[in-house]
Amino acid sequence: MRSTCLRQSSFFLTLLSTLFLITFSSLSRAQSAGQLVPSPLTVTFGTVAVGKTATQQETLKNSGRSTLTVTKLGITGPGFSAQGWALPLTLAPGQSKAATLAFTPGSTGVKTGTLTISWTSRNHSYVSNVALSGTAVASGQLTSNPTSLSFGSVQPGSKKTLSETLSNSGAAALTISQIAPSGAGFSFSAPLSR
């Protein structure tokens, strides 16, 4: 009976020692591995007009103790893209690499997505995620009122003026960069109000 108890005790001690060594080995390996830290973890592009592009910088940093390699990048969500990371991307401890995330919406509404980063360190594979979001609005739309102007009969050397109103009927801001009338005798003066 005592012999059986001693054998069981010895077995449990051996089992506990093995589990401890496995846990210690895994913990030691994890602490010495590379550690990818994306910054920021959430990227918000704000309000962007359909067809326009907004960009944000994203940095991948290795804050671990061993080299890591980014092997794959995946982006879900409409209109989101990444530019500037050539794969495979190897980062030494403390090294970082910045790139550009872009949002070019094709339709209106709130858009969300995810940047998925697959990476390896010390023969182990990991995945990190970055949340993406942006709100797409209709682009600015310039309208004129009236759509045509008729000056009627004007004596040579005389001057006749008419008013034209330009409005933005879209959902996003627009910029008028130039106004250039064509045709002999026509001219344009600066707007009275904005």
Image (cartoon, grey):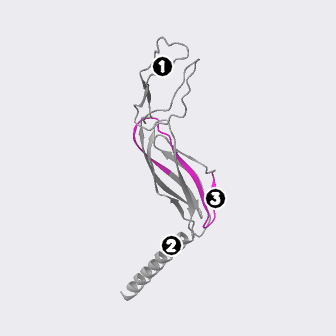
Q: Amino acid at mark 3?
A: Thr
- The Cα–Cα distance between marks 1 and 3, rounded to whole angstroms, is 70 Å
- The disc at residue 170 is none
Q: Nearer the viewer, mark 2 or mark 1?
A: 1
Above or below, 128 against 105 in this view is below
Q: Nearer the viewer, mark 2 or mark 3?
A: 3
| Residue 137 in picture, x, y percent from top left | 41, 38
Identify the element where label 1 is drawn.
Answer: loop
Task: Determine crowd level at label 2: few under 14, some 14-19, many 20+ residues with C-alpha closer than 10 A.
Answer: few
Above or below, 5 against 64 in this view is below
- The Cα–Cα distance between marks 2 and 1, rounded to whole angstroms, is 86 Å
Q: Which residue is mark 3?
A: 90
The answer to the question of whether label 2 and label 3 lie on touching residues, with beta carbons closer than 8 A, is no
Q: Quadrant of the N terminus?
A: bottom left
- The disc at residue 160 is 1
| Residue 104 in picture, x, y percent from top left | 50, 40
Q: Amino acid at mark 1?
A: Lys
Left of 69 or right of it: where is 51? left
Q: Quadrant of the C terminus?
A: top left
Image quarter for residue 12? Answer: bottom left
Above or below, 81 against 89 in this view is above
Q: Amino acid at mark 2?
A: Leu
